[in-house]
Image: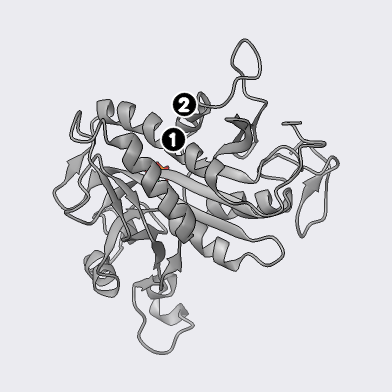
Amino acid sequence: MKETLSNANFPRDSEGRVYHLGIRHGEVANRILTVGDHARAKAIARWLDTEDEAGAPVFVNHSHRGFLTITGRYKGIPVTIMAIGMGNCMMDFFVRETRAVTTGTLAIIRFGSCGSLSANAPAGTVVVPRGGYCIRKNLEYFVKEENRLSKGPVEPYLISGVFDADKEISQILVQELETAMAPITGKHGVGGVVANGLNADGCSFYSSQGRKDPAFWDDNENVIQQSMEAHPDTVSLEMETSMLFHLAECAREPNPIRAAGCMQVFADRVSNGFIHPDTVAILEPTVGKSVLETLIKVQVDNEMSAEGTVWE
Ligand code: R1P
């Protein structure tokens, strides 16, 4: 750690940068596309308006904790593309620290990859969930009997209820995706858009997503079946989108967060199929552009003015 920080409750450096994202007010826009993978963020950033002859966006920052922030304009409107890595924890850092350096409504769309639990969503399709829930390994179950706090029986996995996606953003997103994907659907392994189902976030890629790992005690033979019984319209399984919906629902006035998501199906857990890299090469730029188109069409209340920002 090189910087001098203040406020142990919400650490910032002397110039107001939040500790893990490494950004301050004026460096991130109200309209945000978030991904896991840095390469995906950089590829989508090629759609941004060019600011100089080299085609560079307005602002790029790599934080010491693995967050990549790219801020610029798309068709004249300020947008940020942020790569956050993987898991609920990174989504929590991203949403809270972004909220801390912005004002007004935030419109956030995650564009990720996922596994599919539905025969209707084979590899190469794009899922737009109406909501999401979380599957958590219940650590208490795995505590040695004599060390447990719980007196009664405990389940190995906890499955939450549903956190809703923003309806208006999701509707626009589906329209944009259907229009943009129409010319490529059915070709090169690209499927259609599957909307209105549910996403499940696992707290692990392995245990809570029902993968068998003989090297560890997971007791996860029934976790997928248990999830499908609780939420029969589950389509996708990944690690961030339901957390985004949850945090958006927890955001307090006067600064709401509106959130939606879309995921390319990389792994089909029903038929054990996998997406081909050539399909990703076609699908990813199309979906990325559709998300940017959606973001600039969304109503954002109290959007920050350009004064004092990197997009001024
Ligand atoms: C696992 O390989 C990662 O891929 C999925 C999962 O949610 C998890 O983060 O999403 P991204 O492709 O957006 O990282």
Residue that carries the numbered disc 2 in the rendered image: 43
Q: Amino acid at mark 1?
A: Gly
Residue 160 position (above or below residue 146):
above
At x 52% / y 55%, what residue is drawn?
259
- Residue 288: numbered disc: 1
Q: Amino acid at mark 2?
A: Ala
Q: Which one is closest to the eye, mark 1 or mark 2? A: 1
Give 158 or 140, whichever is nearer the viewer. Answer: 158
Answer with left or right where residue 15 lies relative to residue 124: right
The quarter in which the N terminus is drawn is top right
**How many labels sit on residues?**
2
At x 76% / y 31%, what residue is drawn?
312
At x 73% / y 48%, what residue is drawn?
101
Answer with left or right where residue 184 lies relative to residue 14: left
Badge 2: how crowded within 10 Å, few (<14), some, or many (20+)?
A: few
Labels 1 & 2 near each other (Cβ < 8 A)? yes
Instruction: Give the structural element (helix, strand or loop) at label 1.
Output: helix
At x 29% / y 70%, what residue is drawn?
231
- Residue 10 position, x and y percent, is 75, 56
Answer with left or right where residue 309 lies relative to residue 269: right
Asked which colour scheme the image uses, the reply is one colour
